[in-house]
Image: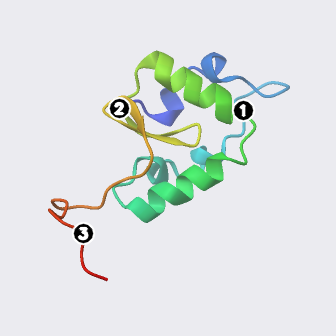
Amino acid sequence: MTRLDDVDIRLVGAGPGPGPYPWPCRENPDLWFSIDPEEVERAKRICLNCAAVDHCLAAAVARGERWGVWGGQLLENGQVVPRKRGPGRPRKEEKAA
C-alpha cells in the first residue's frame, strides 16, 4: 500500500506555486484506507471537492494501487468498486422487510 506522503505529486498534478498540492486527504490519511464503510463513503465525498480528483484516480490506476479511496473512488484489489462491504460474510438471501 502506498502512503499518501510517498505519492509522486507530479503524477496527480501539483497546485500553483511551490510545495505539494493541498489535498484534503493529507489531514487524516487513515480515513482513505478505513475498513469502516461509513468512513469510506465520507472519504469519497470529501474527494469530490478536491481539484485533483481526476488526476488522483488516474494516477492511482496507473500505479496499480490495490486499496483505498483515490480520486473519489474505492479501489479493492486494484479495481474500482461502488462501495465497501461491511465486515463478515454476506447474507445468502435478502432479509425480509
Quadrant hosting residue 95: bottom left
* Location of residue 13 in the rendering, given as x and y in whole percent from the top left corner: 70, 22
Tell me if residue 28 comes above or below residue 88 in the rendering: above
> Does residue 74 appear to the left or right of 16 in the view shown?
left
N-term mark: 2 or 3:
2
- What's the residue type where badge 1 is placed? Tyr
Badge 2 marks a residue whose secondary structure is loop
Tell me if residue 46 comes above or below residue 93 in the rendering: above
Quadrant hosting residue 78: top left
Look at 71% across and 43% down and name the residue there. 50
Q: Which residue is mark 2?
A: 1
* Location of residue 20 in the rendering, given as x and y in whole percent from the top left corner: 70, 30
> Does residue 31 appear to the left or right of 87 in the view shown?
right
N-term mark: 1 or 3:
1
- Alpha carbon distance from label 1 to label 3: 44 Å
- Closer to viewer: mark 2 or mark 3: 3
Q: Which residue is mark 1?
A: 21
Look at 52% across and 33% down and name the residue there. 5
